[in-house]
Every structure is written in C-alpha cells, then in structure tokens.
Image: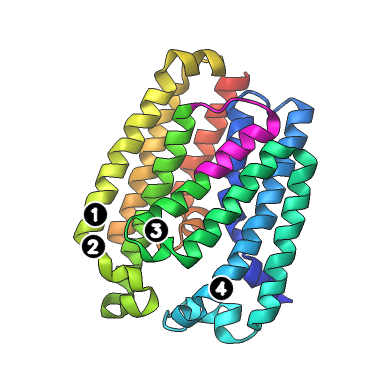
Amino acid sequence: MSSYLKLLRPHQWVKNGFVLAPLIFAGKLLHVPSLILGTSAFAIFCIASSGVYAFNDIFDREQDRNHPKKRDRPVASGKIGVLKAALVGAGLFVISLLGAVAIGKGFLLWVSFYLLLQFAYNVAFRNIVILDILAIAMGFVIRAVAGSIAIGVVISPWLILCSLLIALFLGFAKRRQEIVLLGDAAAEHRSILKEYSVPFLDQLIGIVTAATIVCYAIYTLTPEVTQRLGSRYMILTLPFVLYGIFRYLYMVHVHEKGGNPTTDLLTDKPLLLSIGLWMITSVALIYF
C-alpha cells in the first residue's frame, strides 16, 4: 500500500493550491456554495495530478534509475509494474473527468486541457529546451483558470501572470539543482539537461525573479484589482513575497536545494512562516 501511496505523491497536492487562488482573491471564501465548488475543484485536480504522476513514473522509469533519489520511486524500483501503474493512472483520470462533469462543462474543458498538456509534455515537450519548463508552468496557470471557472468568476490577468512567473521561477530553479546534483551524469537522468547550464539558468532565474516581483507589485496597486479585492492596502503583502522569493534563492544558491520545490516549501520554517503570514495578511485585507 505504501508503494501505491508513493506513486500518487499526495505531498505534491499542495501545488493544486493554485486552484483555490481565485476563490480567495475573488472574495468568495466565505460564500458557502463557492467554497464547496472551489474545494471540489481542488480535490478533482488532486486526483488528476496523481494520475499524471503515475504515468510520469512510467515514462521516467529508466531515467529515474540513474538518479540517486528518484531510483526509489515505485515503478523505477520495480515495486509496482508498468501495467498496474497505468491502470491506476487511467482510473484516476476517469474519476477526475467524471467529477469535472459534475461541476460544469467549462471546468471539464480545463481539466481535459490539463491532462492533454501533461500527455504532450511526456511525449514531446519534455525534450525541447525551455518549452519543457513553459509546459510545466502552464499547468499552474490552468489550475488557476480552472479554479475561477469552477466558482464562476473572471480571473484577473495579473493573477494569471503571477502564477505563470512563479511557476517558471520554481521550474528553472529545479533544473539548476538537477544539474548541480547530478553533474556530468545529468544528461543520463534527463536528456534535456544537456541543453542547460548553470550560468544560463541563473540568467533565466534572475529575469523571472525580477518580473515576478514587479508583476505582483503592480497587481496589488492596479485600480481594477483594488476595486475587485475591496482593499487599497494589498501592497502590504509585498514584503512577504519579497522575503519568500529571496529565501528560496538563498536555499537554491547557498544550500543547493530547489530540486523538489514542494518539499523545500514544506520543510523550510522561515519560508513556511513567510507564506503563512502572506496568506493571513491577504485574507485579513480582503475580508476584514
């Protein structure tokens, strides 16, 4: 049973928090029908993403065997066979699509788009430099848009941009850590890694870092957003965003982390505190 739990990677469900962003920032968190729809959409993406992880383990099994940590994954280690993993993944896809139907056609469309993007990534995009990271980042954007569709609100373009940029930031940092960790054997684990270098990724991280900060700052100050959120003081959340980004950069460059963003986010206490304070301050400004 523990092997199947590892196959589903429930600790990665935190990424689906992007589905809940529109619920919070549209001021619908205390609206019970919207809360039910939003949390249902979150659960459906958790099911869908676990199905994706099952197939990722199948596609990555040979490369994972050359990785010091990933070689213990269920399919790579042989604890779960390819056929069984495929059946689990397909079953989760069916469940997620049936759940999406219950929410609505628009939401179903975005869940389907998410699954198609993951398939395209596994068969093609993963081998195309830069497009591999863009495809992963678009998965986060899809989550945010799907969350807004589920509760029937129009998502802010600034929220879409912020979601895209922070996902790119995490994606480039992950590629950097893979190269640093694996060294000359990086290409054996993931062939696309031979197309990257640490200086190149550092440049990309620097560009995306600056863009993320500027985009979020503008998001908090735009009159349209201020009116929608009902608060003129969202700029007060910027220091938490700055600290969170700078802390993550510190972890990447000083402690050579970033290979597993979810684990890094959940285990670093200062970073967790920053995220928690950002969430508390945002909710307080919007709702109280």
Of pointers 2 and 4, the one earlier in the residue sequence: 4
Q: Distance between the residues labelled 3 and 4?
A: 17 Å
Q: Give the range drawn in magenta.
A: 141-156
Mark 4 or 1, which is nearer the eye? 4
Q: Which residue lies furthest to the left in this view?
A: 199
Mark 3 or 2, which is nearer the eye? 3
216 versus 170 height, above or below: above
Residue 221 shows up from this direction: yes
Q: Distance between the residues labelled 1 and 2?
A: 6 Å
Q: How crowded is mark 2: few (under 14 residues within 10 Å), some or many (20 or more)?
A: some
Q: In which quarter of the image is residue 67?
A: bottom left
Q: Dot 2 lies on which element? A: helix
- Residue 24 — which label? none
Q: Dot 1 lies on which element? A: helix
Amino acid type, callout 2: Val
271 versus 30 height, above or below: below
Amino acid type, callout 4: Asp
Q: Distance between the residues labelled 4 and 1?
A: 28 Å
In the figure, is residue 63 to the left or right of 115? Answer: left
Amino acid type, callout 3: Asp
Name the residue beneath numbered marker 2: 198
Residue occupying the point 41% across, 36% down? 241
Q: Where is residue 180 in the image (x, y as percent from the top left)?
A: 29, 69
Name the residue beneath numbered marker 3: 132
- Residue 57 — which label? 4
Q: Tell whether position 153 is magenta.
A: yes
> From the image, which quarter does the C terminus lie in?
top right
Residue 235 shows up from this direction: no
Residue occupying the point 38% across, 66% down? 127
Of pointers 3 and 4, the one earlier in the residue sequence: 4
